[in-house]
Image: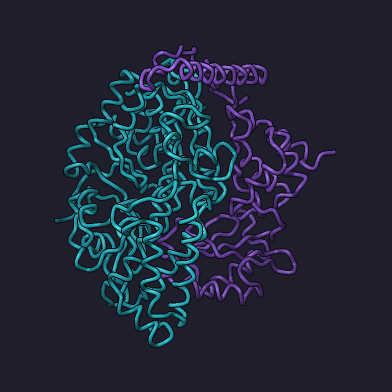
Amino acid sequence: MSHLSADVLERAKDLVALYPEPRSALIPLCHLAQEQDGWLHPEAMSEIAELVGVTAAEVRGTATFYDMLHTEPVGTYVVSVCTNIACLLGGAEELLEHAETTLGVRAGGTTPDGVFTLEESECLADCDRTPCVQVNHRYVGGQTAQSFDQLVADLRRGALADTVPHHGTLVRVRRSVGLEADKETIVAERAAIEADKVNRAEAAEGATVAGPPPSTSSEAAPTPPPPTPRKPSGGPA
Amino acid sequence: MAITDAPKIVTARLGYDDSHTLERYLATGGYEGLRKALTMTPEAVAHEVDTASLLGRGGAGFPAGRKWSMLRKNAITYLVINGDESEPATFKDHLLIERDPHQILEGVLISAYALQVTQAFIYLRGEFALGLERLQAAVNDAYAHGAVGADIFGSGFSLDVVVHPGAGAYICGEETALLESLEGKRGFPRIKPPFFPAVNGLYGEPTVVNNVETMANIPWIITNGGAAFAALGEGRSTGTRLFALAGHVHNPGVYEIEMVKTTFRDLIYAPVLGGGITGGRTLKAFIPGGVSAPWFGPEHVDLPLGQDEVGNAGSMLGSGSVVVMDSSTCAVRAAWRITKFFSRESCGQCTPCREGSGWLERIMYRIENGAGREEDLDLLMDLCDNISPGVAWPPQQTTICVLGPSIPSSIASAIRMFRDEFLVHIKDGGCPFA
């Protein structure tokens, strides 16, 4: 019984197939796992590791670098208050202080009922509506103390359910177009690319051993044929 | 100097509520540039962009056409679009991605054709949830329309476009960190050489990395010709550019302005642009191109919005974001907050940046909060000098990427312009603006 649901696993495999190398799907798969759990469960990280062919530690190593990937549980709604320069000039520190009072937690904390996590964030690129606030990465900018309290009340009673999904659901529009090539072709192409890399590395090494000046070594090395690009399809898979 | 009636190149469609849809895009000349490009040779398309002399809109300002022609000597494998807009107070790409995703996509398609690339990735910062949805919807619709995928518009040219979400890290805007992130790793910038993307990029393959706004300009250039684009602006700064205006102005926002013809004064004070300083106060200082740029004072407001003009005056146009600070702003607090940002976003690979940013942040914090010492000013400058020797502009580099050398900009500017303010903080044991 896997931790990730059958539907999530199916979508995960589709995502892996989009990339020339499976590891590229690591961050998209972390988002997908967060869509299921709201955060990155250790078992989810292990399964992502298997899907992209790395160790669980490598998944954790990548995930801990990024602010949006949570290796500890967070609230249903993650409220990010930007306090960077434009928002600072627009009163963000006062708003953050107010938010801490309203929610009863310091920045970085989660309310005891597990509904809200409050974050002090860096610039969210919405600097004409300061102070900038995001809830689960949906913009609700230009907040005042009063409007913030209203926002919290609206979120609590589910009035914003259509615009602000639960934490982890980043993108509700899925890719509806597939790849023309079947999975075997993709695997074969990847093997060809790997072989090609080995060839080139050997050629480069051979050139170094033979000792021609570096400026001519690339010309002297035999040029391997470029891998045939996969033709993407024009319609849904 | 004045506000010119130059055509709107990248914001023409933004007046429509449905500017992000394929229907609106097609009704307003969308994908005509792509159709035209597909009738030309890839070399002719690249030549058109070269003629336009379009400077990359990401921050470094390298000519896009020259980037491509350098690369055409080697076959390029991947085209990667940098939509990781995270420079504080920069929000122009945000607007383009949410409001006109097809325009970016068309630029990607034309560029991929010019470079003869069959795989493109558009990397958007993860916080752009709506942008990710709009761009994915645009890709889906464009596939159905035959503009993306196999045999585009019957031309025989094929391209797959993958929309890739980031996950929250400023450093991933640095192109080699972005490639690491796209490979599923921590966003650690790569050492250059040997990891110039053009030679050794994504998966070790030759890769072109271009900014979102750069892409958005391409359809207009192909439709109207590179010469028409080059006729706008002046000198090396051709065409129009998006300026993101933030801070203490009446009308903060994103404005498309002809390069060089307009000044900072126009941008900040013109009623149709910034509308002047709020609260009847006066201008204290402004940051001309993102928080990595040294600050300017009121004496610089008559500088034109041009890359070389700003560069020669000792700062940079950078990411095109202008932050206005009025007379009520505490320069120490502003510089402290910017330093805190760098300290938080340093990837941690290089000691001068990792340690230096944290030390600077703590010293700035203690000055702002009343525990500063007079010798702190020299200490700050000494630390800045360790990160970027000479604290000059353009900065010297001791680190793998340019994040480190960007850290001293705000502190050195604040000390140079407002030394007395620092001394008052230290003498009075607190912030006079609090």
Residue B164 vs residue B95, the one in the foreground: B164
- Specify the quadrant that holds the C terminus of chain B: bottom left
Q: Indicate the quadrant where residue B218 lies.
A: top left
Residue A229 at x, y percent in the picture: 52, 18
Residue A67 at x, y percent in the picture: 59, 54
Residue B89 at x, y percent in the picture: 40, 59
Residue B57 vs residue B280, the one in the foreground: B57
Q: Indicate the quadrant where residue B75 lies.
A: top left
In the displayed structure, would residue B396 be above or below residue A80? Answer: above
In the displayed structure, would residue B318 be above or below residue B155? Answer: below
Q: Residue at the spot x=72%, y=57% of the render?
A: A73
Colour mapping: by chain
- Specify the quadrant that holds the N terminus of chain B: bottom left
Colour of the chain lettered B: cyan
Residue found at the very far right of the displayed protein: A1
In the displayed structure, would residue A14 be above or below residue B339? Answer: above
Q: Which chain is purple?
A: A
Residue A78 vs residue A199, the one in the foreground: A199
Q: Indicate the quadrant where residue B239 lies.
A: top left
